Image (cartoon, rainbow, N blue to C red):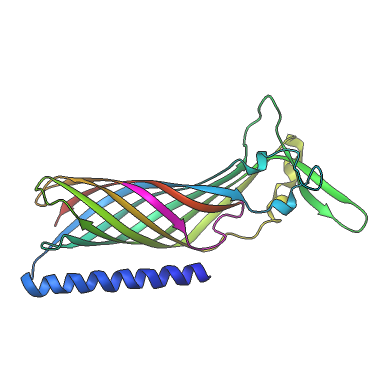
Amino acid sequence: MKKTYFSLFFSLILCISAIKLFSQEEAKKNTYLKFIGIESGAVFYASEFKQIDLVRKQDQNNYPSDIYNKTSFYNWYLGAKIELRSSEYKLGIQTGLRFSTLNSMSGSNYSDKNNDFYYFLFNEDETAVEYMRLRGIKQKANYVGIPLEFRYLMLRSKYVKLFCKASTEFQYLVNSKSDVYFLKEEMEVHENEVIEKFNKPNKLLSTLYFSGGIKFGSDENINFNFEAVFLSFVLSDNNSIINKPLAGGGFQVNIQVPF
């Protein structure tokens, strides 16, 4: 929750600063440029397995297999955006509608020659402890929301422009699905019981990211934007029931036309 408050505060500061600069330009020249376009991109995060206490140790300090910690966490998105940009300062404000798919994986979803697995705590009481042999756990969560991006064009060539961006987004969970991959297929009847060991995914997704890129095309015609996300953080908690995301990076492509 504290991370979400930080994201809101940071976004508010960005918005106030951008609007202030934009208002100064409008007072001078009273002109601005408008664009509409579509976007697609992906961000890949380093991550770590969250429920380490549910994995059986080999001894006091070691685990029998580290396959549970072979994690992946990435966000793929598609959306439509409008941009309002001042003609003097080259400052643009972008927002729109974005659909995202958050994918996380721990372990593996296929069999290999080593039959790698880890022991996952299934049931525990005063008299007995039961473990299941898992190859992996996967989650897919779909979100819809609003991005808020602030772009500054640094190179002012007519047909090629370099830019940097500071951005955030706020999204709401539409649906999610989790799959458990057992070492033995006959254990799949217990899939829901394993999933219930984890918390439900957070309904709110908030990220903060910084990027830079290049824009091809004049302001009067269609233009193409390619950017690299240098640093990204997931500010909200528990968007994945499996993994904890760390810092990440990725890319975004954007096609715009003036209107």
Q: Which residue occupies 6% across, 70% down?
A: 29
Q: Nearer the viewer, residue 98 or 162?
A: 162
Residue 165 is left or right of residue 237, and the answer is: left
* x, y percent for residue 3: 49, 67
Residue at the outermost right position: 127
Q: Residue at x 32, y 52 (%)?
A: 211
Residue 153 place in picture, x, y as percent: 19, 55
Please report the residue visible at 70 percent of the width from the left and 27 percent of the height from the top: 114
- Left or right: residue 126 versus residue 170 is right
Indicate left or right for 163 with 29 as reference: right
Task: Name the residue furthest front.
Answer: 61
Quadrant of the image containing the C terminus: bottom left
Is residue 234 found inside the magenta-colored segment of the image? yes
User: Vertically, is 254 above or below 150?
Assistant: above
- Name above or below for residue 151 compared with residue 64: below
> Residue 258 falls in which quadrant of the image?
bottom left
Depth check: give the residue in front, 162 or 226: 162
Q: Is residue 153 located in the magenta-colored stretch of the structure?
A: no
Image x and y of residue 20, in percent: 21, 74
Residue range highlighted in magenta: 228-242
Report whether residue 231 is seen: yes
Where residue 190 sits: x, y (%)? 75, 47
